[in-house]
Image (cartoon, rainbow, N blue to C red):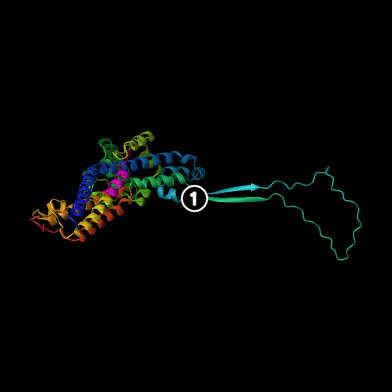
Amino acid sequence: MSDDADVRCSSACTRASIAVLILCAISLSMFKPVDQTQRLDALLKYTSARLILKEELERLEGDAAWRGLMAIEAIAETARNKWNLEKLLDYTFVDVVVARSSESSAKPDDAKPETKPDVALPKSKEAPSVQRPAPPTNLQIRFTTVRRIEPLHRAAEALTELGKGDILALGRQYSPRADRSIYGWTMLRHRLNKERMRLNNPGIVVVEMAAAEQPRSFFSSRLFAVGSFVRNFTREELIKNFTLPLLNELANYESPTVAQAEALKKEQPDIALPSFGIPIGLLRSITIIELGMLFTLFYFWLYYRDARSSRQFPLRATLFGVVARTPAPGSIFFGFLLIPSATAAILAYKVLWFTYDNAPIAILVIGVAVAIRRTGPFPRLNHPAL
């Protein structure tokens, strides 16, 4: 390979290296917005669950199964005030709809039968006389539907979502206002749950959960819930200890509004990339940056392979020649490959809260970096006199 080809390969690799480092710097600057977006998403989940809980309880009186339960005078008051959610969720109402057929319409008296011309028909000796049966009357069709109290089932799902302590702990870190709101609501839930446990189990001592016990979650909430720990509640624990009055008290405590949820939704950050000129979402920006990092590394790998095929590699006054004159060229080269690989992996891990789409891109970035390293170790300068 001629010197001119070596210079062109080195120039291409230099441009690719600068582009990769710039993309890595942009990726590093996105770490904090991603963390804040995670907190905002957790707060939105909390707010949405609170809205669903309140709205479903407001729809309860219009539910057919609930009205059927309240129609049973012997247990209506007990069910409303003392039954726990577990018993209310197990209740089913059999709804029977009876459809009656209309009376069989006989021909009116004034209706004359159709007259036919007198035609002499041959008499059949074997033709029996069959009497036509009368049409059935007063038919009934019964439709039986087993209904459950749907608003309570949806409210129980929202209550289960609110029992995830790691999400609530993450939402508390979004802002001081969110921290105060979630803290007050969780303290009310804790007090109501403790009182109900003592009522259901007289004579026992309720031992408080150690504050140092962190909630277990896939997303390693220990990294985010320091100082704002919220205990996890299982679905079974919640539906056994909460009655309808307690659930209403919990739903009405500083209840958020739809306008507040929409205002939070608008706080999601956007990033304006120069190439597009218009703001785009944070997650889409991260995907674009990781794809740019992948293609740039692949571009570097193609020209690096071509440069290594030269007998004069690394040539002086080129990128590879300058690096080869340093005391530890291999370490610099390894660090160059490590930076984009680590940046892409960390960024993909952070957005796992929202989507898994960036994980394959990060794996491909690491794969290209490994392919560059396997092309061969970075040598020292072989032609110091040139």
Identify which residue, 86 or 178, lies in the foreground. 178
Q: Position of residue 319 (x, y in %)?
A: 16, 51
Q: Is residue 299 visible?
A: yes
Q: Secondary structure at mark 1?
A: strand
Count of picture labels: 1
Residue 239 appears left or right of 144: left
What is the quadrant of residue 82 in the picture? top left
**Residue that appears at 79% across and 56% down:** 132
Extent of the magenta region? 279-292
Q: Position of residue 52 (x, y in %)?
A: 40, 41
Identify which residue, 338 or 128, lies in the foreground. 338
Q: Quadrant of the N terminus?
A: bottom left
Residue 54 appears left or right of 225: right
What is the quadrant of residue 365 in the picture? bottom left
Q: The disc labelled 1 sits on which kind of residue? A: Thr
Q: Position of residue 170 (x, y in %)?
A: 27, 44
Q: Position of residue 15 (x, y in %)?
A: 21, 47
**Residue that appears at 26% across and 57% down:** 367
**Residue that appears at 90% across and 51% down:** 117
Please name the residue that numbered disc 1 is placed on: 92
Q: Is residue 255 visible?
A: no
Task: Tell me, yes or no, whether the highlighted magenta stretch contains residue 66.
Answer: no
**Residue that appears at 34% across and 38% down:** 265
Q: Quadrant of the C terminus?
A: bottom left
Identify which residue, 280 or 201, lies in the foreground. 280
Majority secondary structure in the magenta region: helix
